Image (cartoon, rainbow, N blue to C red):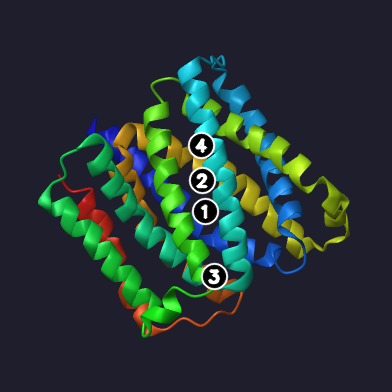
Amino acid sequence: MKRESNTYSWLLLLAMFFWGTGWSALKILTENLSMDVIIFWRFLLMSLAFLPILYFFKVPIRLNFSAIKFIFASSVLNISFMMSSFYGIKYGLAGAGSIIITSLSPLMTFLLTLILFKNRVSNTQTFGIFLGIIGGVIILNLEDLGLFFDGSNIYFLLCALIWAGVTLLSQHSQVHIHPIHYSFIISLIATVFSFFYGYSSGFSVVFSQDSRFWSALLYLAIFGQTIGTTIFFVASGKLGSERTSSFMFLVPVFALFSSWLILDEAMQIHIVIGGAISMFAVYFINKH
């Protein structure tokens, strides 16, 4: 059991790397095209990327009413998350978005778990949760709380709340449906929805984009979405939503490094300190 837990921990570390670097990819995508076009292609490529994964596992898809309820709820939340993150990243910074979402989402998941399921959480895990928040605040270097609630940050706060709901749904859905099927069907529904929603925007405009755009789109859809999200969903069923969501504290570290390397966004000493504190938060939350 401990070996399995360690395996999922390493996989989650990889997933967080994909998510963190995906923020820089998303920033590149928002430079020239509208939200409708990007969301459609993002979900379409994600759905296509699932086909070889489905073939590899060869697990028959079985749906019942309970599974459909989870899928529908998660589809709505996933689309809402994509729309909120798009507007947030379009008008804000890739690094700031990753910090706000990944610092607050584990806390919101933690609180929702306590309220809805009355799960017991140790003092060590509670300490880790608040340590992660402190790390996020230090990374963000908040000097004016009023500025925090202005503009793009509102979208990022909404993303954090939405993703807390997604995490809980993914954990409890695995009683009714395999997590890979769960991820694939959600992606498929989102593709169909975004097609009808954004059809008038002209999807063919992506074919006039350069290699930088396509590299970002393929990376985000395949690694950031298909592989990263599937690992997260699988791990949430194995490790629990609290432990799994705690790994999100590591996303800012990867996001800020990639945004510095790719987008030339400034990296400062408070970012390094806050990132180190966030890493310790993951350790305490996962300590038994």
Under circle 3, the secondary element is: helix
Can residue 252 be seen in the rendering of this structure?
A: no
Q: Give the CA separation, mark 4 to mark 2.
A: 16 Å
| Residue at figure coordinates x 56%, y 59% from the top left | 85
Q: Which residue is label 3 attached to?
A: 152
User: Eyeballing the image, is 39 above or below 99?
Assistant: above
Under circle 1, the secondary element is: helix
Q: In this rendering, which labeled residue sits more in front, label 4 or label 2?
A: 4
The type of residue carrying mark 1 is: Phe
Taking 161 as reference, is 64 left or right? right
| Residue at figure coordinates x 23%, y 55% from the top left | 283
In which quadrant of the rendered image does the C terminus lie? top left
**Label 4 vs 2, first from the N-terminus:** 4
Q: Are marks 4 and 2 in contact (CB under 8 Å)?
A: no
Taking 131 as reference, is 183 left or right? right
The type of residue carrying mark 3 is: Ser
Q: Are marks 2 and 1 in contact (CB under 8 Å)?
A: yes
Q: In this rendering, which labeled residue sits more in front, label 4 or label 1?
A: 4
Residue 118 drawn at (x, y percent): 20, 37
User: Crowding at label 2, few (<14), some or many (≥20) Cα neighbours within 10 Å?
Assistant: many
User: Crowding at label 1, few (<14), some or many (≥20) Cα neighbours within 10 Å?
Assistant: many
Q: Which residue is label 4 attached to?
A: 74
Q: Nearer the viewer, residue 182 or 149?
A: 149
User: Eyeballing the image, is 245 above or below 211?
Assistant: above
Q: Are marks 4 and 3 in contact (CB under 8 Å)?
A: no
Which label sits on residue 180? none
Q: Which residue is label 2 attached to?
A: 228
The type of residue carrying mark 4 is: Ser
User: Crowding at label 3, few (<14), some or many (≥20) Cα neighbours within 10 Å?
Assistant: many
**Label 1 vs 3, first from the N-terminus:** 1
Which label sits on residue 18? 1
Q: Give the CA separation, mark 2 to mark 1.
A: 6 Å
